[in-house]
Amino acid sequence: MAQTITQKILSRAANRKFVDAGENVWLNVDILLTHDVCGPPTFDIFKQEFGPDAKVWDPEKVVVLPDHYIFTANEHARRNIDLLRQFAAQQELPNYYDVGTDRYKGVCHVALAEEGFNIPGTVLFGTDSHTCTSGAFGMFGTGIGNTDAAFILGTGKLWEKVPESMKFTFEGEMPEYLSAKDLILQILGDIGTDGATYRAMEFDGEAVYSLPVEERMTLTNMAIEAGGMNGIIAADAVTEAYVKAHSSKPYEVFHSDPNALYHSVRRYNVRDMEPVVAQPHSPDNRATVRSVQGAKITKSYIGSCTGGKLTDFMLAAKILKGKQVTVPTNIVPATVKVARDLETETYEGVTLKKIFEDAGCSIALPSCAACLGGPADTVGRSVDYDVVVSTTNRNFPGRMGSKKAGVYLASPLTAAASAVTGKLTDPRDFL
Amino acid sequence: MDTIIQGKAYVLGKNIDTDQIIPAEHLVYSLSDPEEVKLYGKYALSGVPPEQGGLPQGNIPFINEGGFRSDYTIIVAGPNFGCGSSREHAPFALQVAGAKAIIAESYARIFYRNCVDGGFVIPYESAHPLTEAVRTGDELKIDIEENTVTNLTTGVTLPLNPLGDVFNIVKAGGIFAYARQENLMARN
């Protein structure tokens, strides 16, 4: 029987030859990811259900990456880090990346890639909705809650309903004014925030495979914004080179069968597409930047698992080099690695860090920061009637802090161009 | 488990995401300390813009000032309830506030799983849009065996979609209770 790539990976994890869309199957989990917000309650449930002295099923397969509320004086947030630290020590978890040490990484989805936990063909569950990001590596990644995570901690298994797949093919050569963010915002506008609920979103086509792995991660990252269970891009030579550079683990590359059944197939030609934003207050409220050009903004924010990778900052630097921002602009590298790369990677001979500093941006320490608002002292948090243009992933009311604020989700190019003018601005005006 | 759930309805719109159910700044409290847990009730649905809370009239708070338990035990909503972040704090906060069931047109996957596997609240799907047929404050009666909801204020009875596969997990009270019952917790 023909299968999609998602079915093949789930078949492998279920020790089956074939799994059908719609059936509930028990999966063997390759990696469980958690962080500072959901780790402590997950560990509580684990101890309550398996006993105070129980050991996790496999310490090598548990990855704990604190990233949400790191640089804050909030005492409850700090207590959560202490709880992670205690559990990691008690369970002797080798893959705990402690805050305040040189092991600290930053935003978990980007750090997973950098630390070599994204392995083609494997199954990853994480207590974060953006766990789907890892699907860019030709693997299955999806978000779960604390109870499900505690179940995995004890057993290494979880049930999941095999999803139907939706295919999104992007043909054509990527123009310099578009980024992966424009592609996924285009899809969200077409199918809505529940257009892929309980389904896999599979991306392919010449334009997708021309992108570096980090840009592909922007596509899979926002599958959850359409309600998708997972986003997935079959591994190619680019993926394999990245994986080999970051890990020595064996991997298995799966492809969808040519005659696999899909819920739906959508085709786009990137040459026909324009820079777009998602207007307040929903990620599917799409408009071309041209059609809303000139709307005043009060802040620009470039960061998060979606838009805080090195490739995002390379795009922003193209616009910001030699320019001045006219609204407060936060540069928030996703990870310590990305922050270091800003100091060494250059655009036209100047480091990205210097380009951003000279443009008047503030560079923050790596964490999730204001993507999800966070405690009151979080860098970049929206206040009152702020209007933010942001490379993050969600703009529901209050997401970045203030319930009264509005957030435009945009590509790094659009966020940078708008930072210069203080108004929503199509990046083509600067390229 | 009871076969009847009866209580006052609190009506919301579509795409109520988990940041509106429990804003991210409140995710720092303990989910096991009995006193601290009350804060989740206090802030349940506090991220919903006031005019969109307690429809159709709006500006009806879910939790009264200073309290942590709601007068409303059945939440009625449009499509895509619980979209957004994976935080299990969201269905937990609704449970702490006293909610027993949600009747929405549809759910986001992670929220739905969390409701069922954590045994917090029962996530029913209405076969027809309910937000037109129910006003905040109406008295509702859900019959779990019959898969129906009756609006006792208006006298109208409407069908609910059967819970299907997950009914056994709901009945057991969550994934752990279910897995013990079915002997699924052994390693490999």
Image (cartoon, coloured by chain):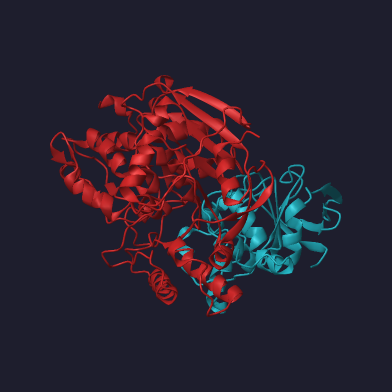
Chain colours: A red, B cyan
Position of residue A86 relative to residue A396, above or below, is below
Q: Residue at x 54, y 40 (%)?
A: A226
Q: On the rendered structure, is B158 left or right of A113?
A: right
- Total numbered circles: 0
- Residue A227 visible in the picture: no
Q: On the rendered structure, is A16 left or right of A339?
A: right
Q: Residue at x 64, y 65 (%)?
A: B95
Position of residue A206 relative to residue B75, above or below, is above
Front-lying residue, A289 or A170: A170
- Residue A81 visible in the picture: yes
Q: Horizontal and vertical percent for residue A347?
A: 18, 36
Q: Residue at x 62, y 42 (%)?
A: A163
Q: Quadrant of residue A195?
A: top right
Which residue occupies the extreme left position in the image? A349
Front-lying residue, A370 or A398: A370
Q: Horizontal and vertical percent for residue A338?
A: 27, 49
Q: Quadrant of residue B114?
A: bottom right
Q: On the rendered structure, is B164 left or right of A298?
A: right
Quarter containing the N terminus of chain A: top right
Q: Horizontal and vertical percent for residue A262?
A: 62, 31
Q: Horizontal and vertical percent for residue A33?
A: 46, 58
Quarter containing the C terminus of chain A: top left
Q: Residue at x 17, y 41 (%)?
A: A355
Front-lying residue, A270 or B41: A270
Q: On the rendered structure, is A46 left or right of A429?
A: right
Front-lying residue, B156 or A257: A257
Which residue occupies the extreme bottom position in the image? A53
